[in-house]
Amino acid sequence: MGNKQMNNKNTKKSKNKKKKTRKIIVMVILLVLLVAGGVFAYKVHQNGGGMSGMLATMVGHDKNTKKNLGEFRVLLLGISTDQEDVDLTDTIIVASYNPNTQKATLLSIPRDTYTGKNTAKATAYEKINALYGRKHRPDETLEAVNEITGLNIEYYVVVKTEALIKLVDVIGGITFDVPINMDYDDPTQNLHIHLKKGEQILDGDKAEQLVRFRHNNNGTSYPEEYGDNDLGRMRTQREFIMQVVKQTANPGNIFKIGEILEVAKEYVITNIDFNVAKDYIPYVVEFDTQNLLTDMLPGTTPDWNKTNGVSIFVHDKKKTQELVNELFFNRDIEETGEDGEETDEETSNTSSKSEITIEVLNGTGNSSDLQKAVNQLKGAGYKVTRTGSTNTTSKTTIINRKNVKESLLKNMKDVIGVGTIQNTQTSSSKVDVTIIIGKDY
C-alpha cells in the first residue's frame, strides 16, 4: 500500500510539472506573438498605416523604402486575338506611377501611328499596331514608342483579350458609366457590341465590347466633344483602365490575388521582374484616380492620297516633346517650388484667367445647372465663350484643349466643386477648355 501511494504521488507531481511546463510554453508563445504583433503594428504605423502600411510591412519594406522608389513607367499593349494568325494591338498606352507623389499618367498612342520614314510610300505594316503581330516581339513596339516619345521606358505588359475578360469576371465586374449606346457587329472578327448608355456593372464580355468600340453599324460614333472614333475609343480605354485599377485595388480583392495571378500567368506577357513589381504594389492601394492625368499623342491624319492610300496618323514631333515634358518631367516642378510652396508662376491672377476661353456643356439633364456653373466660373474671373448641352453623364469632366496649365485646371475644379481633369489637346478647337458638367455637380 505504501509503494502504491508513493507512486500515485509521484505520478501527480509529474502531471503537475507537465501542466506547469505547458502553461509556461503557452505563456512564452503568447508573449512572443504579442511582441511580434507589437513590432509588426509599429512597422505598419511607420510604413503609413492602413492597408498600404500592412502590405508594405508584409513584403519587407521599412520607412525609407518608399522614399527610394522612383517613377515607374511601363508600356501597356492590349492585343486582340480573335483573328486567326493576326494579333493586332488595339490598345497602346504609356503609363507612369509615382508612389511618393501618388500621381499617375496615361498617354494613348493611336494605333495607326506611322513608324516608317517616308509617308508617301506608307504601308499598313508600318503602323505601330502591326509591329507586335510581325514576330510577336513587344520590344519592337517598345522601341518605336521610345523613339516617338523620347522616354526611356524599360518595361512592357502585353494583355491579351482573354486576360481582360477573365480579370473583370474574377473581381466581380467593373462599375462603369458607358458614354453612349453602342451597336456594332463584325462577323469576320466574331465581334458583336451591344451596350446601353449609362452606369452599369460590366462583366468580362461587356468590358471587351466597351474598349473595342469605335463606331456604330450606321456610322455614328462618340459625340465631337467626347472625341469621335479612335479618339473616343482611346478616351474610353483610359477611363476604363482608371476604374479597373481603382476597383481591383479594393482591399476586398486581396483574397482573390491567387486567381488574379493565375489570369496574369496564362494571358499576360511582361518583362517586369516580380521583385520590382512588389515594391510598388503596397502603395497603389492608396491611389486616388483624381491624381491621374490622361492625354493622347498629338498629331494629324493626312489625306489618303498623300500616304499611298493608307490611313495613318503622323505625330507632331514638337508638340509631342512639349506634352511628354509636361506629363512626365515638369508635373511636380510646376506645382511646388523648392520649399514646397506654390511658385509665383503657378499663382494665377485675374488677367491670366480672363485669357482662357471656356466652353461649358450641360450633361446633368437639369437646365438650371448650366447657368449656375457659368456664373461660378465668371465670378472667379474666367471667360465663358460657349455653352450648350450634351448627353447626360454622371461625372463632371474638365478637358484641357490648348495646353492650359494644370494649376488653372485644378482651380476650375475648385470653383465648380467637382471634376476629373483630362488632356485632349486639339489644335483646331475653338476654346481652351471644355467643361462637361455631370450629375455629380
Image: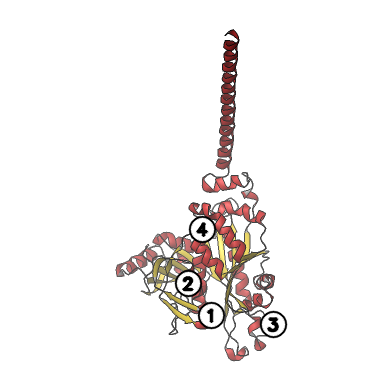
- The numbered dot on residue 278 is none
Mark 1 is on which residue type?
Gln
Seen at 57% across and 14% down, the residue is 8
Q: Nearer the viewer, residue 269 or 67?
A: 269
How far separated are the C-alphas under marks 2 and 3? 34 Å
Q: Is residue 66 left or right of residue 356?
A: right
Q: Position of residue 242 (x, y in %)?
A: 51, 63
Task: Give how far across and how far down residue 154 sits, in percent.
Answer: 68, 64
Where residue 142 sits, quadrant-wise, is: bottom right
First-in-chain label (2 vs 1): 1
* Marking on residue 117: 3
Where residue 187 sits in the image (x, y, percent)? 50, 82
Q: Earlier in the sequence, mark 2 or mark 3?
A: 3
| Residue sitting nearer the eye, 366 or 219 | 219
Residue 148 coordinates in the image, percent (x, y)? 65, 73
Mark 1 falls on what kind of element? helix
Which residue does the numbered mark 2 point to in the structure image?
210
> Is residue 286 among what the camera can see?
no
Q: Is residue 354 left or right of residue 325?
A: left
Q: CA distance from mark 1 to mark 4?
A: 29 Å
Label number found at residue 248: 4
Image: 429 above or below 46: below
Spatial CA distance of label 3 from label 4 is 41 Å
Q: Which mark is residue 189?
A: 1
Going 50% across and 71% down the picture, which residue do you hit?
208
User: Could you classify mark 3 by the number of other residues whose Cα lies within 10 Å: few (under 14), some (14-19), or many (20 or more)?
Assistant: few
Rendered position, 285 above or below 206: above
Of mark 1 and mark 4, the one earlier in the sequence is: 1
The secondary element bearing badge 2 is classed as helix
